[in-house]
Image (spheres, grey):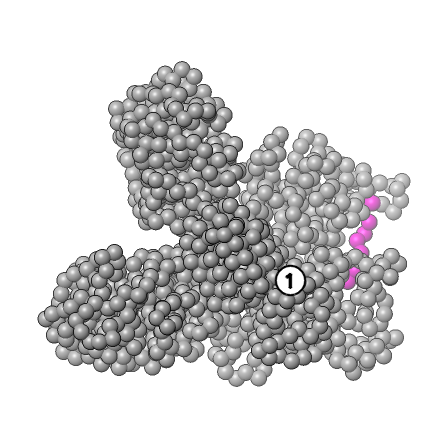
Amino acid sequence: MNPQPRSIMSSPSTVQEVADSQELTSNGKRYLSQPDRPVKFGRIAAETDDDPVSIEDALLRLRTNRLLEYNQPVYIAPIAKPNLQAPDNSALPLMDKVREFLAGNGQVMLIMGDSGAGKSTFNRYLEYQLWTNYEAGDRIPLFINLPSLKQPDEDLVAKQLRTIDFSEEQIWDLKQHRQLLLICDGYDESQLTTNLHTTNLHTTNLFNRPGQWNVKLLITCRTQYLGPDYRDRFAPKETGQYHRTASNLFQEDVITPFSKEQIELYVEQFVPLIPRTWVKKDYMDKLTTIPNLMDLVRNPFLLTLALEALPSVIKNNATLLNLRVTRIELYDTFVDHWLEVNKRRLQDQTLKDKRQAFEDLLEDGFVHNGIVFQKELAWAIFQQQEGRPVVEYSNMRDKSSWKASFFGPKAERSLLRDASLLSRTGNQYRFIHRSVLEYFFSCFVWDTSRDDYEFAPHVYSEATRVSLPVTDHPLSKRSLVLEPSVILFLAERVQMQPIFKQYLLALIELSKSDPQASMAASNAITILVRAGKHFNGADLRGIRIPGANLTGGQFDSAQFQDSDLTGITFTKAWIRQADFSRARMDETRFGELPSLKEASWVQSCAFSPDGRSFAMGLLDGNISIYDTTTWTRIRLLHGHDAAVLSLTYSTTGFPLLSGSSDGTVRLWDGEGDATDRVLNGHSEEVTAVAFSPSGMQFASASTDRSVRLWDTRTGTITFVIEDFGDVTGIAYSPDGNNIASCCLDGQVRVFDTQTGLQVLSSGTSGKSRCLTYSPNGQSIVSGDIFGDLQLWEATTVMPRIKWRGHSEMVDSVEFSPNGQWIVSVSEDKTVKVWSGDVATLVSVFIGHTSWITSVAFSPDSSLIASGSWDQTVRLWEVNSTRFGLDVDGAFNSKPRVAYSPNGQFLISGSRTGAIQQHDAESGEIGLVIRRQEFRANSVAYSSDGRQIAMGGSGGDVTLWSAHTGVLENTLRGHTRDVIVVAFSPCGQWIATSGEDQTVRLWDARSGTSILIFADGGTFFARSLSFSSSGAEIAFGDYIRTMQVWDVTTGKCKMEREEAFFVRFLPKSLQAVSCEGVNGARLWDEEGGGYRVILQHSRIVIQTFAFSSCGQWIASVEDETVHLWRSPLEVRPQDWEYVLAVKGCSGRIGEIVWRPNKLEFATADIHGSTLVWRVVERFDKVVVQLVWGAGGGGGLAASGSVLDDVIGLNTISRNLLEQRGAVLSGNI
């Protein structure tokens, strides 16, 4: 008899992990009843109302039922990191974190994870462990499947207890006398948007109040469901202050993807569950050999699907290295496999009165009908109950409803239902996993592999037309913008099936003429952007796509004239040189706010307590006051004679307090533009000022080595604290009893504000520049001149965590008012946000072009304002998760790029040790090579295109197959990081430069080190270039020296100064060097003379690259590319300067030309790789973006045209204008 697959995939919490043996009972793993069958609980109450059951007996019966129901034959203990942005290597066992939560004072723990990460599996295992070890009086674990309850945000506990037959008397008893742990599973699936802790506070069943429910909540939710301000949905509120978050009562953790070790352990436990022909080694060989499959199956649910599907996937594929497997392909294969197994199972059963129905299904195609059944059910669930996954069906009540066609008693329906990926508990049905529901929903929208697809057009051509009325199309029925998982499935289908892409493009085209196509077109373009489709240069005139999410989309030089773009999201989009003339742009969002421009350097800034005003102190001594509703300046305060180094508002709003390098402290009233009081006392510049929480006292710090405490009412000094170094920062404790100071001697000192006496002092840690208290008063964070940040225990000033936050001095640091974040700014021009408890990097904001001097949070913690010497204050939306740079993908990667010799591929390597091989035309990623714990500083193709070299951390140079991604050789010799790697055009040599100050030549075939050009001296090569013959090699170093060596003799032919970057002219023996402001020099073959070929009075040349034809040069200056063209006649004159290309989010680290094409690629320090095309139109040269990938900064809008656009608000207009857009007409 064929095995039933439901022994593995039996519920939403299926086989995903291996048991922690220390917490299992002596019986080991349990293989118990199937959750897809109706579960019949014994009644908690007695058989008669006259014989009441004690609460302990009722709990014992509940415990027995829950333990018997548990069915997880495989369990792998999950690992979790402290927040979404924390790196995976900061993760710890999730069970340990839950134990800490249960033992501590916290009230809510949020566990997040991707779809299929194992959240439900963990919840069931946690409940099982708690019930296994339960003793009378313990906290009671109550597992709540939120989607199964109606309105779980009201009367949550009692509702759940009633479903398991607790009487009202027993519920009252539990409420008055017992402690509970509410394990709330599936917050996202229940479609909740409210705070369970807070909303239940407003019912008659209050949480954690005297005489009411005493509970801790453990809530699980998919990360894809969470919005930017998700913490407000989960964090408890302070007693009597429901508007304030009690951050000390809230904990969050994120389940990380499986490691290789976890995958191996899972496979080891999976194999013996049922008889199989494969053993563990067979599975692991396939998982590790098929390119990129190991990355895919780090998701536990996908791992389950992959293990079931792998035998079918590779059946007809002898060469695994050429096999590509995607997520949606795993679902496709698994579904077919599942239905085939269930078909065989049904064939072996008698079926009695269902036999004829089964034979009819076989004749018509059982698998086909099973897929149709599940697709239609998924569609109905989204249409009829807004995607809520649990369907309750009663044959008596629902026989006339839509549910009857799926759950009614008809034999055909019953057979298909029994063979489907559904689980059943009582009268409740659901797909075994949320992602399965979303998969089948996406298949209903599009699945050309099935011939039943009702909406598939009959013919495709360049002029594709939709064959059915567009209003009948599934994409016209509902917006998918809020269904990111469905969008992802459809995006993967686009990448698999080009015909689907053409169909979506046809819908967008149809919207130009048919207004009824607007929703379908909006969904279509959202899917295409998610799939990586580029719309650079596209004709989108007149399209109607209201509400589309175009986040991260590329629309360089696109034509949007007369389009309906109402409610569009353009966060991080590339709309450079796009034309929006006459477009409707009501409520269009860009994910950013305009910066505030001043005539002088910004030295300090502060928000008023109510958030309505914002003040900035300037280098010229003035103070600008802005209205934050419109971000317009409403006042300009004059008085200080020098820079305003510090600002703060009183807790009541005014007075405003300022300290200046003129040595004075000033109080400003709330009405006029004049100083209320000028306070003297300091003999040198005032570096910091602060109000006490009560507003009755304020403090000032100075480089005169003192801190002064003042009475706000009288303006008199109450205490002078002296006798230590220049004081650079001060902060009051939240209770106002203490004030902390820091100075360049590295110590943090704490003083009593009522006596002026020192009460605490830290050890020495760096040279502190700034500090602040956390809102709960438990921590102090400080920043120093070396770029380090330090967390201290406030009560003892003992150090907790120290980390490198910036590459240069930290100028300002602040806690968010809700205590969740720390923000720091630096002279390295970055704003960085860190988690407030464990100091992991959350986000990085870029955009300032000079030192950042100050930072402030808005009172609601939603905005960060940063002031800079670039004369601007920039406003960053903390909750705009798409605005800050992706931490893993951007700031851990300074990519290096190289084209294959035939120009077909572009590779990019990053500091994460990953190499991605892109199709040079489309940007689509093919081969991905990962080397853990390795930082790639340089990448290069061999001259025949067969190998990829990667040089980086540790001194190794690795050689990989460009076809399969297999490691073929490792060159060892450098003792420190490798900076540059280059192949010779002849294919014989590989040259490398390292931080060990050597340049080495290697035999490309054997990997043997042949020659060391510079050995242990001061030469530190940052560029390497072979001549066209490969007989010469030139390198330039960081100390502005250029050398040219003969490879065959190993002798230096030329050495010149004032050149730190060098390349050989294509098809020539002449070298070209550059050194900043001195332009580029073309040297004769003997190195005796040169002539300047690139020079411009306002252009600095930091690096450059030649086109393969030798007629174009692209040079780099910070974030800008300058394009030059060779003179038509060969004569001693400068090359012609053509134009500047702007738009990169950060300083460009590398630039390369595509062979035999007028295209070049740039890689910037923030992770972006951009490919540009040079187009010659008559006498005009235009540079257009072809595609881009990786990190990236914010919005790119330079050169976009917005003539006569409709509905664009003032703030968006100012933002676009600052980004270089051209605005005119009526807006």
Report how many numbered discs are placed on residues in the image: 1
Say if residue 818 shows up in the picture.
Answer: no
| Residue type, numbered disc 1 | Ser
From the image, which quarter does the N terminus lie in? bottom right
Depth check, front residue: 487 or 553: 553
Extreme residue in the front direction: 1225
- Specify the segment rendered in magenta: 36-45
Q: What residue do we see at 64% from left, 62% from top?
A: 518
Q: Quadrant of residue 463?
A: bottom right
Question: Which residue: 60% across, 35% down?
Answer: 243
Q: Residues within 10 Å of mark 1 (few under 14, many from 20)?
A: many
Is residue 40 covered in magenta?
yes
| Left or right: 137 in relation to 1098 | right
At which x and y percent is residue 832? Answer: 41, 47
Q: Which residue, given by chain and number where applicable, does mark 1 sit on?
A: 518
- Secondary structure category for the residue under label 1: helix
Q: Is residue 928 magenta?
A: no
Q: In this orientation, which residue lies closer to the viewer: 1145 or 1077? A: 1077
Q: Is residue 52 visible?
A: yes
Q: Which residue appears at 48% of the width and 79% of the height?
A: 321
